[in-house]
Image (spheres, coloured by chain):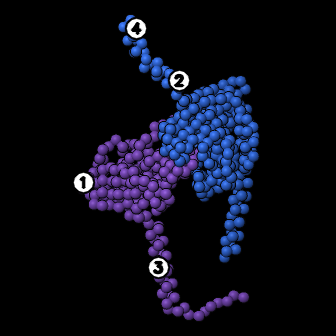
Chain colours: A blue, B purple
C-alpha cells in the first residue's frame, strides 16, 4: 500500500503537467493545404517570444509538390493559379485604429488597411491590394517604404513566409484571422486555402493559435474590401499617378512663385 | 521687353554677398565631408526566428574587414564576436560593427559624430522606438540594426576601447530621450 501511495505521489507532477498542458493556449499549429482534393503543402506557425511587443507569430506555407525538390510554383499550378499570399483581418481589439485616409476602423477590417494605418500610428507604406504582403513597390523615393513587406522578399523557391509582431500601448490586445490565398498572375483572388486565427497581447505575445479550413464569410471579406484594388495596377498606371502628382506639385510651386 | 538694372552695387551689399557666398561654400564643404571618425552605414537585419540563426543580442566588435553589404557585415560581426580583444597590428583604421536593440518596422536610426577621448572612442546611435512611443502597429516585422562605423585615427601602441550608445529618442535626429541608452563596449589592441 505504501509503495502504491509513493507511486501515486510520484505520478502527481506528471498528471499536473499533462493537465496544465491541455489547458495552455495553443502556441503552434500545423495544417495540410489541399487543392482539388490533393495535398499541396503545409502551413506551420509558431508563437515567438522575440520583438519589442512581447512576442509575435511566424512560420509559413511550404510546398510538398513538384520537383523534387518541391516548389511553390508546382503548388500554385496544382491549385490552378500563379502565386500565393496571405489575407489577414483584425477580428477583435480593445484598441482604436485609423486608416491612411483618416477613417476609424471597426473589426473586422483588413490588415494592413488600404495604403496602411494612419501616419501617426504607423507611417509604413502599404499597397492598395487586400493581401498581407505588398504585391508591388511604390515609385522610387516614396517615404516610409519598407521592402521587407514585399511578397518577393517573403518567398523562396518552396516557401511563402508569414511573420507578424504587432505592438501597441500597455494592455492592448488584438485577435486576427489569417488565410493563405491563391492568386492569379494579376494579383486577383483565385481562392482561399485555409488559415489560422491567433491573438496577440502586449507583453504576453501570441496565444490561441487555431487552424481552420473554411473561407471567410462575407463579413470577413466581401463586405470589407470595397476600397481595395482587385488586381495589381499596371506599371503605366503607376507612372500616370506619379506624373499627375508631379504636375500638381509643380503647379503649386509655380503659383507660390 | 527686358529691364536691366545697371546701377552699381553698394559696398555694404557687396560685402554681404561675398560673406553669404563663402558661408554657403563652407556649409557645402562640411556637408560633403563626414564628421571626424564617422563614416557609417546602418544595415537592417530582419528578425526571423524561423530562418538561419541571426544576431541574437546587442553587442559591438572591432574588425579590420570593411563589409560590402548587410550579409558581409553580419559575417564579419560573427567572425569577430568570438575574439575578446583582437590585435589589429599596425592599423590606424578599422571598422566598428555594432548590433543594436530589436526595433520595429517603422523605426529609424541615425549615427551622431563619434570622437576619441584619449584611447576611448565614443559614438552614439539615435533611434526612434515605436514600442516606447506606444505606437499601434499591426503588420510589423522587427529588425536589428547593425551599424558599420569607420574608426579612423587609432592611437598607436596599446589597448583601445570603443563605447557605443543606442539612444531611443522621440524624433530624429535630436528628439527627447525616451529612456536610458543601451551601452555596449569592446576593446582591441594595436601595435
Residue at 60%, 30% in the rendered image: A210
Query: Which of the two discs, 1 and 3, labels the residue nearer the N terminus?
Result: 3
Judging by the rendered image, the residue that carries numbered circle 2 is A22
Report how far apart the C-alphas of labels 2 and 4 lie in the structure.
Answer: 26 Å
Quadrant location of the N terminus of chain B in the rendered image = bottom right
Picture layout, residue A42 above or below residue A231: above
Residue A88: quarter of image: top right
Q: Are marks 2 and 4 on the same chain?
A: yes
Q: Chain of mark 1?
A: B
What residue would you read off at disc 3? B22
Left or right: A46 with respect to A134? left
Left or right for B9, reference B101: right
Location of residue B117 in the rendering, given as x and y in whole percent from the top left corner: 30, 61
| Residue B158, numbered circle | 1
Residue at 72% over, 43% down: A224
**Left or right: A143 with respect to A216?**
left
Q: Residue at x 49, y 21 (%)?
A: A18
Amino acid at each position: 500500500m505504501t509503495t502504491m501511495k509513493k507511486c501515486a505521489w510520484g505520478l502527481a507532477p506528471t498528471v499536473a503537467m499533462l493537465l496544465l498542458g491541455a489547458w495552455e493556449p495553443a502556441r503552434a499549429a500545423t495544417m495540410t493545404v489541399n487543392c482539388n482534393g490533393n495535398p499541396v503543402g503545409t502551413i506551420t506557425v509558431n508563437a515567438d517570444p522575440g520583438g519589442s511587443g512581447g512576442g509575435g507569430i511566424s512560420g509559413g506555407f511550404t510546398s510538398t509538390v513538384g520537383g523534387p525538390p518541391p516548389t511553390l510554383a508546382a503548388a500554385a499550378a496544382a491549385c490552378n493559379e500563379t502565386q500565393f499570399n496571405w489575407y489577414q483581418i483584425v477580428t477583435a481589439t480593445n484598441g482604436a485604429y485609423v486608416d491612411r485616409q483618416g477613417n476609424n476602423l471597426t473589426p473586422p477590417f483588413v490588415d494592413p488597411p488600404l495604403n496602411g494605418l494612419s501616419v501617426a500610428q504607423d507611417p509604413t507604406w502599404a499597397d492598395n491590394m487586400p493581401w498581407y504582403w505588398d504585391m508591388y513597390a511604390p515609385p522610387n523615393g516614396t517615404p516610409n517604404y519598407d521592402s521587407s513587406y514585399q511578397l518577393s522578399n517573403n518567398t523562396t523557391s518552396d516557401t511563402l513566409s508569414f511573420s507578424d509582431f504587432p505592438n501597441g500601448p500597455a494592455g492592448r490586445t488584438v485577435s486576427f484571422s489569417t488565410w493563405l490565398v491563391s492568386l492569379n498572375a494579376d494579383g486577383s483572388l483565385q481562392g482561399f486555402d485555409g488559415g489560422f486565427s491567433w491573438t496577440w497581447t502586449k507583453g504576453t505575445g501570441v496565444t490561441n493559435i487555431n487552424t481552420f479550413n473554411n473561407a471567410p464569410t462575407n463579413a470577413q471579406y466581401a463586405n470589407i474590401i470595397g476600397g481595395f484594388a482587385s488586381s495589381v495596377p499596371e506599371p503605366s498606371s503607376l507612372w500616370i499617378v506619379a506624373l499627375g502628382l508631379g504636375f500638381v506639385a509643380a503647379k503649386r510651386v509655380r503659383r507660390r512663385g | 521687353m527686358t529691364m536691366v538694372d545697371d546701377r552699381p552695387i553698394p559696398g555694404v551689399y557687396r560685402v554681404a554677398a561675398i560673406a553669404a557666398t563663402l558661408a554657403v561654400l563652407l556649409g557645402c564643404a562640411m556637408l560633403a565631408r563626414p564628421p571626424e571618425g564617422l563614416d557609417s552605414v546602418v544595415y537592417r537585419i530582419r528578425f526571423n526566428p524561423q530562418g538561419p540563426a541571426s544576431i541574437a543580442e546587442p553587442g559591438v566588435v572591432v574588425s579590420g574587414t570593411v563589409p560590402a553589404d548587410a550579409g558581409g557585415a553580419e559575417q564579419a560581426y560573427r567572425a569577430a564576436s568570438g575574439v575578446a580583444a583582437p590585435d589589429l597590428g599596425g592599423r590606424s583604421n578599422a571598422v566598428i560593427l555594432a548590433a543594436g536593440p530589436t526595433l520595429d518596422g517603422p523605426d529609424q536610426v541615425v549615427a551622431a559624430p563619434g570622437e576619441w577621448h584619449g584611447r576611448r572612442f565614443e559614438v552614439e546611435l539615435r533611434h526612434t522606438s515605436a514600442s516606447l512611443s506606444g505606437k499601434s502597429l499591426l503588420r510589423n516585422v522587427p529588425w536589428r540594426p547593425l551599424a558599420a562605423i569607420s574608426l579612423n585615427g587609432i592611437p598607436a601602441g596599446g589597448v583601445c576601447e570603443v563605447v557605443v550608445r543606442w539612444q531611443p529618442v522621440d524624433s530624429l535626429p535630436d528628439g527627447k530621450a525616451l529612456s536610458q541608452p543601451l551601452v555596449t563596449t569592446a576593446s582591441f589592441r594595436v601595435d
